[in-house]
Amino acid sequence: MNNWSLLKRHAQVLILIASQPSVTTGELAQAIGTNRNRACRITADLVAEGYISKNRDGRGFSYQIVPDPPLSEERRQEIAVCDYLKSFFRRKRRSKRNRV
């Protein structure tokens, strides 16, 4: 059986940061199953590409999702990052029609 992941590590980090902006690099590393150095490289990639911003917060950092990051030409056809992340956090609303 092949090992594969539905969401690659960069996407996993985006989702974690969207839900918990004060997450530490160590927590990111543990959550995605890698080491702290790799987690630092992933956040650096996301900052460099404009998907997140990184701000000093005491001795650590806090992160913020950039709502409309500039997309390269090949990414313009992809779904907007915020729309992608929102899909993970939408709550299903029960309509009055569905209540019994």
Image (tube, grey):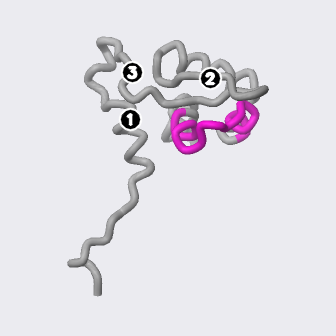
Q: Which residue occupies the extreme left position in the image? A: 97
Per the rendering, the mark at residue 90 is none
Q: Which is nearer the N-term, disc 2 or disc 3?
A: 2
Corner quadrant of residue 31? top right
Q: Please provide the residue range marked out in magenta.
A: 14-30
Secondary structure under badge 2?
A: strand
**Label 1, on which residue?**
82
Q: Position of residue 13 (x, y in %)?
A: 57, 34
Dot in front, 1 or 2: 2
Contact (Cβ within 8 Å) of mark 1 with mark 2: no
Q: How far apart are marks 1 and 3 (CA)?
A: 9 Å
Which is more toward the observer, 90 or 30?
A: 90
Residue at coordinates 48% horizontally, 15% vertically from top-left?
Answer: 49
On the image, numbered disc 3 is attached to which residue? 69
The answer to whether residue 5 of the structure is visible from this angle is: yes
> Residue at image x 36%, y 63%?
92
At horizontal 33% and vertical 65% (from top left) the residue drawn is 93
